[in-house]
Amino acid sequence: MRALDLVIIAIFLVGMPLLGILIGGRQKSGNDYFVGEGRISWWVACLSVVSAETSTLTVLSVPTVAYLATPEAGGMTYLSLAIGYICGRVVVAFVLLPRYVAGNLVTAYAFLGKRFGGGLQGTASVTFLLTRLLADGLRLFATAIPVKVVLAAYGVDVGYWTIVAVLGLAMVLYSFFGGVRAVVWVDAIQMLWYVLGAVVVIWALSGSLPDGWFGGAVDAGKFQLLDFSANPLTGQYAVVAAVVGGAVLSMASHGSDQLIVQRLQATNDLRASQKAIIASGVVVFLQFALFLFIGVLLWAFYRGADPVEELGLNNNDELFANYIVNELPSGFSGFVIAGILAAALSSSLGALASSTVTDVYERIIGRELSARDRLRQGRLWTVIWAGLLIVFAGFFASFATSSDPIVVQGLSITGYTYGALLGAFLLGLIVKKARQVDAIIAFVATVVVMAFVILGVKFDKATGSLVGIDFSKATDTTVALAFPWYTLLGVLITLVVGGLLSLRHSTPDPRAAESSAPPERAQEAA
């Protein structure tokens, strides 16, 4: 009977790339390949943004967050982050997006090039490339978890390297041939697929829960939404940390990360991109709630058993995959696993390629490429980045026993650089005297300081007071700064350092006048 699941998964892995190639059509230029010539509807871009940012980390790991939540922390407090996400997107929609869309820029970092110069544009782009390589390598590895579980159910032992190589090949096909138009449309379809898969899981779980499960879940705090008791410095989902930190994190991810900005630039006009980004915040909130609810149902189904000690899993993030493979009926299991694969195949390759070609390669050779050469280089770098993602995903397999949910690990990776990226944009908009050298020094200083803070600063787990500097892993008595604060702290460091350095200059930077002028509304695509 399980053979049906494998057939469904195989059809999906072959069908989605082919569908993307068909939708993408023939690419005629670099702009067509990278931004789709502005022919994507806002609602398609909205679904694509949601698919790109939540991916497998949400599908697999967010249920684990609710499952492992304690009565003190609460099972739905992760939604506090989503509240902040909505607030941050509103700011991006009206402050940063006009400068990208109306300015007809290929990448977000082209704005930094106009404001400061090519040096900072290249620095920001390389930082994005490295951060995205780590984050998406982790995401690709996360997708390999349920695949390995389902193959093990058939007695087939396949290594993570083999699995991520096959997934990477499927992802690169439609990105290579279809460009951003294929990526955005396939993202939208795949997002609907895995959400429908989540509904199937809820339907299956609802018929197999013990009596009184709802009251038990309420008593265990599984439906608690806001956490006012946790220390705001160390509590990851404390209200202040989650809402404020989540808002700034969303401003960085949706205003300075080319993965998201590229999808928004592919819309018809500025108003369409604004609708897409704000609507995506609401959709993300609902999606988080959906997968957190699954985590609560799994808690009731397994009666709160420890995933590793009592259920015999390799790590906590295998919990959801274990249920899908071993408990769902044949056919439904394959459909849901295909949905998880859909979440992973939301491709970042186009964003990586566009930033590499326009922000780095063209700067190195000292000239802009022709439309045909830009298309050729875009496809070449799509393949190169696919290979690098596969390699990094394989390396992450070495950390498969980590006790932290994968979604937390993924968000922590961005903490090193997101503050510097967003801070550079805000420095250019707010501090008119700041020059390129000031911005680059502030950018590098922020990354170094944030690495020191994330890896070394420890707080007492019980009192929340600062313990000191300790570069060893957190223990039962110590904890690091909560990850929602990483981006905000990084932004403040960039603004303070860049602002102080700008005091050396007596007059505003001539570049500031052009880049900070109110942008004209983009014309609608013909």
Image: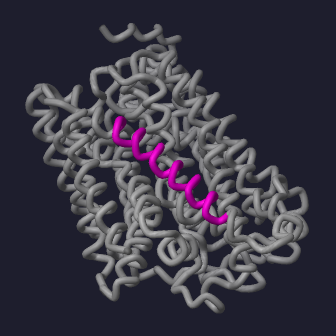
Name the one closer to the observer, 427 or 370.
370
Quarter of the C terminus within the rendering: top left
Instruction: Tell how many labels.
Output: 0
Quarter of the N terminus within the rendering: bottom left
In the rendered structure, the answer to whether residue 161 lies left or right of residue 77 reads left
Query: In the image as oriented, which residue stretches furthest toward the front?
Result: 1
194 in magenta: yes
Q: Position of residue 438 (x, y in %)?
A: 49, 39
494 in magenta: no
Instruction: Name the quadrant containing residue 203.
Output: bottom right
In the rendered structure, the answer to whether residue 325 lies left or right of residue 173 reads right
Residue found 29% across the figure and 72% down from its top:
163
Whether residue 504 is visible, yes or no, is no
**On screen, residue 2 above or below 347:** below
Instruction: Name the quadrant containing residue 164.
Output: bottom left
Name the one closer to the observer, 342 or 399.
342
In the rendered structure, the answer to whether residue 425 lies left or right of residue 278 reads left
Name the one closer to the observer, 458 or 523.
523
Residue range highlighted in magenta: 184-205
State the predominant SS element of the stretch in magenta: helix
Q: Position of residue 224 (x, y in %)?
A: 84, 58
**On screen, residue 516 above or below 241:** above
Residue found 72% across the figure and 61% down from its top:
236
Whether residue 38 is visible, yes or no, is yes
Q: Position of residue 114 (x, y in %)?
A: 38, 25
Residue found 60% across the figure and 29% down from its top:
278
**On screen, residue 256 above or below 14:** above
**On screen, residue 453 above or below 269:** below
Q: Position of residue 244 (x, y in %)?
A: 74, 45
In the rendered structure, the answer to whether residue 255 lies left or right of residue 7 reads right
Residue found 57% across the figure and 75% down from its top:
319
